[in-house]
C-alpha cells in the first residue's frame, strides 16, 4: 500500500503523549505496520516527528521513527482523531505536597471522549494512583452514557530502562489489567501484536498498584545502599568494597549507592502510595527520605571540600560537577539528583569557578556546560555525580580532590 494512501486513512491507534515512553511506543506500533497518530501539546515536537526526526536521545529510536514516518504508518498532530484504540502516555506530576496530579490523564481522556465509539479500546500507560482507570471510565460514561458497557478500558504500565527502551518494549513482560475481563482480553490482543514478552492478565487496580510496587521496591533497595554509604563515610570504610564482599553471600544482592534517585519512575512512584496510604507505607516513605537526603549530603560534601581547599591554599577552587542526567549515559534530567546537587552547590557560590558537565546534551537553558575533558583537566575538585561512560576513561592528577558519589573509581578498578 502506498504511503500516501496510508496517510489519508484514519489511524488505527491514537497515542496521546510523545515523550520518553509515548514516542517509542508509537514508533514500535507503527513499525508493525499499524497506522498510528501520535498526539502532543508541543508543536515543535509534532513538527520534529513529522520530519522523521526525534527530540529525545534513545538508541535505535531515530531509525524506527524515520522509517515509520516515511512509510506513512506514523504521523504526529496536536489533536486526536477517530481511531479504534487510544493509548494515554502522558506525565503524571505532583501537586505541591507530593500528591499525584492526574489532570494530564484527565485532559487526554476528555480530548478523545467525543471520538469514542462502540468496541473501542482505551488504555492508560501513564503511572497512575490506584483507581485512576475506573475514574476515567466514570468520566467517559458521564459524558457519553450511551457507551456504558460498550467500550473497553485497561491499564498497562511500561517497565523499560532508558537507553534500552526499543528492545525492552518488545521483550519485557507486561501486566495488563482491564476494568472487566473483556477489556483485559481485548488489551492483551492489542499488545500481543508487538510484544514478545509474556502478557500477564489481572484487573486494573492491581495493574496500577503493580507499577507503583515495582519502583517502590527498587527505591527501598537503593535507599539501603545509600544509607550504607553514609554509615561507611563516618566509619572510614570503603562502601564499594564492603558491598562487593557482602554480595559474596549467596542470598545477598546489595545495589550500588549513588548521589540519590532520579527519573520519572523510582523517584516519583513511591509517593503515589505514600500519599494515599500514609500510615501503611512507613518503610516506603522512609526510603524516599533517605534517597532525597543522600543528594543533600552530596551537596554538603562538595561545599565542605570547597571550604577545606580555601583553608589549605588560601584561594577559591575550580570545581567540576560531573553529570546532570538522572542515570548514566542518557540525556534525561527529570527528577535528577545530580541536577539538584548542582543547583544546591551553586546557591552557595562565591569566587570559585565551576565547570558543569553533561556529555549527553549540547546545551542547558540554565547551566553553561563544559566538555568533560576540559573540566577534568582544569578542576581542583572533581565531583562525580553520574557514572557516565566518558568519565571512566579520565586520568586524574594527584593534586586533584576526588569526590566519587557514583563509583567511577570502582569502574576503573574493575
Image (cartoon, grey):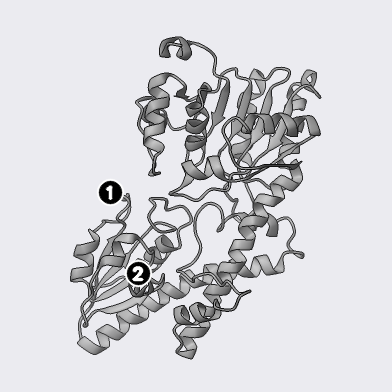
Write down the quadrant of residue 324 in the picture. bottom left
Task: Tell me which residue sits at (41%, 31%) in the image.
Answer: 65
On the image, numbered disc 2 is attached to which residue?
384
What residue is at 41 percent from the left and 20 percent from the top? 71
Q: Which mark is residue 329?
A: none
- Label 2 vs 1, first from the N-terminus: 1
Give percent across and percent down for residue 19.
47, 39
Residue highlighted by disc 1: 362
Disc 1 crowd rating (10 Å Cα; few below 14, some 14-19, many 20+) is few
Q: Nearer the viewer, residue 92 or 361?
A: 361
Side (left or right) of 350 relative to 186: left
Judge from the rendering whether residue 232 lies leftward or rightward of residue 325; answer left or right.
right
Q: Residues within 10 Å of mark 2 (few under 14, many from 20)?
A: many
**Quadrant in which the C terminus appears:** bottom left
From what the image shows, is residue 305 above or below residue 220?
below
Q: Report whether residue 317 is seen.
A: yes
User: Image height check: is 46 above or below 250?
Assistant: above
Amino acid at each position: 500500500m502506498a504511503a500516501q494512501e496510508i496517510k489519508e486513512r484514519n489511524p488505527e491507534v491514537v497515542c496521546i503523549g510523545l515523550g520518553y515512553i509515548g514516542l517509542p511506543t508509537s514508533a514500535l506500533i507503527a513499525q508493525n505496520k499499524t497506522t498510528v497518530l501520535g498526539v502532543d501539546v508541543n508543536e515543535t515536537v509534532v513538527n520534529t516527528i513529522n520530519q522523521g526526526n526525534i527530540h529525545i536521545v534513545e538508541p535505535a529510536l531515530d531509525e524506527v521513527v524515520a522509517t515509520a514516518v516515511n512509510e506513512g504508518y506514523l504521523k504526529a498532530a496536536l489533536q486526536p482523531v477517530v481511531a479504534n484504540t487510544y493509548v494515554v502516555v502522558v506525565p503524571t506530576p505532583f501537586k505541591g505536597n507530593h500528591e499525584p496530579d492526574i489532570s494530564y490523564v484527565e485532559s487526554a481522556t476528555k480530548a478523545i471522549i467525543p471520538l469514542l465509539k462502540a468496541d473501542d479500546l482505551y488504555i492508560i500507560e501513564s503511572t497512575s494512583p490506584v483507581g485512576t482507570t475506573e475514574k476515567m471510565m466514570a468520566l467517559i460514561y458521564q459524558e457519553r452514557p450511551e457507551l456504558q458497557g460498550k467500550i473497553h478500558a485497561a491499564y498497562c504500565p511500561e517497565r523499560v530502562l532508558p537507553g534500552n527502551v526499543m528492545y525492552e518494549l518488545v521483550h519485557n513482560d507486561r501486566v495488563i489489567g482491564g476494568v472487566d475481563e473483556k477489556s483485559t482480553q481485548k488489551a492483551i490482543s492489542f499488545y500481543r501484536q508487538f510484544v514478545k514478552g509474556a502478557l500477564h492478565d489481572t484487573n486494573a487496580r492491581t495493574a496500577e498498584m503493580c507499577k507503583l510496587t515495582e519502583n517502590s521496591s527498587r527505591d527501598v533497595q537503593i535507599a539501603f545502599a545509600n544509607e550504607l554509604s553514609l554509615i561507611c563515610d563516618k566509619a572510614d570504610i570503603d562502601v564499594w568494597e564492603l558491598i562487593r564482599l557482602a554480595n559474596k553471600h549467596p542470598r545477598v544482592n546489595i545495589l550500588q549507592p549513588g548521589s540519590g534517585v532520579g527519573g520519572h519512575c523510582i523517584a516519583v512512584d513511591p509517593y503515589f502510595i505514600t500519599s494515599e496510604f500514609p500510615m501503611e507505607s512507613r518503610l516506603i516513605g522512609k526510603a524516599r527520605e533517605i534517597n532525597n537526603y543522600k543528594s543533600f549530603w552530596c551537596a554538603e560534601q562538595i561545599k565542605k571540600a570547597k571550604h577545606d581547599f580555601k583553608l589549605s591554599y588560601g584561594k577559591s577552587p575550580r570545581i567540576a560537577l560531573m553529570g546532570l542526567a538522572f542515570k548514566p549515559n542518557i540525556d534525561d534530567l527529570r527528577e535528577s539528583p545530580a541536577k539538584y546537587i548542582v543547583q544546591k552547590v551553586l546557591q552557595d557560590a562565591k569566587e570559585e569557578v565551576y565547570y558543569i558537565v553533561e556529555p549527553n546534551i549540547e546545551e542547558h537553558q540554565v547551566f553553561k556546560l563544559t566538555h568533560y575533558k576540559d573540566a577534568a583537566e582544569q578542576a581542583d575538585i572533581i565531583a562525580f555525580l553520574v557514572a557516565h561512560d566518558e568519565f571512566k576513561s579520565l586520568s586524574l592528577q594527584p593534586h586533584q580532590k576526588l569526590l566519587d558519589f557514583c563509583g567511577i573509581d570502582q569502574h576503573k578498578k574493575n
